[in-house]
Image: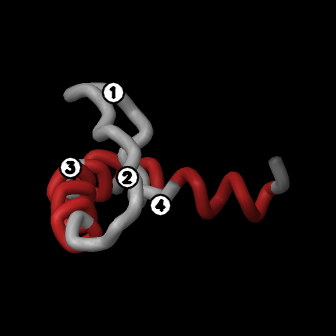
Amino acid sequence: MTDLQAAISIHQLARVEMNWEPRPQIWRRCNEALAVLPIDLPAAPEEGAGGRGTPGVM
């Protein structure tokens, strides 16, 4: 990790919880919006598990 990456990361760490909290709602909204399409969506991660990025389309 470079000094620049470390300097940016240390400030982002202070906001981790704030940025993490809306992830389940974002996941739910994306799945609801994509549910009308004839595609397979990934299963939602279990509560408390990681992996709640933007849901991908499979």
The answer to whether residue 14 is visible is no
Between discs 1 and 3, the one toward the N terminus: 3
The answer to whether residue 57 is visible is yes
Separation of residues labelled 1 and 3 (CA atoms): 11 Å
For badge 2, the amino acid type reads Leu
Where does label 1 land, which residue? 49
User: 10 Å neighbourhood of mark 4: few (<14), some, or many (≥20)?
Assistant: few
Judge by depth and name the residue closer to the eye, 21 or 33: 33
Judge by depth and name the residue closer to the eye, 21 or 56: 56
**Label 1 residue SS:** loop
Q: Do callouts 4 and 1 mark residues in contact (Cβ within 8 Å)?
A: no
What residue do we see at 84% from left, 54% from top?
A: 2
Where does label 4 land, which residue? 57
In the displayed structure, does residue 9 sit left or right of residue 37?
A: right
In the displayed structure, does residue 33 sit left or right of residue 7?
A: left
Judge by depth and name the residue closer to the eye, 52 or 31: 31
Between discs 1 and 2, the one toward the N terminus: 2
What residue do we see at 28% from left, 69% from top?
A: 34
- Between circles 1 and 2, the one closer to the viewer is 2
Where does label 2 land, which residue? 41
Between discs 4 and 1, the one toward the N terminus: 1
Separation of residues labelled 1 and 2 (CA atoms): 18 Å
Residue 36 position, x and y percent, is 21, 71
Where does label 3 land, which residue? 24
User: 10 Å neighbourhood of mark 2: few (<14), some, or many (≥20)?
Assistant: some
Q: Do callouts 4 and 2 mark residues in contact (Cβ within 8 Å)?
A: yes
User: 10 Å neighbourhood of mark 1: few (<14), some, or many (≥20)?
Assistant: few
Residue 13 position, x and y percent, is 45, 49
For badge 3, the amino acid type reads Pro
Judge by depth and name the residue closer to the eye, 48 or 41: 41
> What coloring was used for the rendering?
secondary structure
Separation of residues labelled 4 and 2 (CA atoms): 6 Å
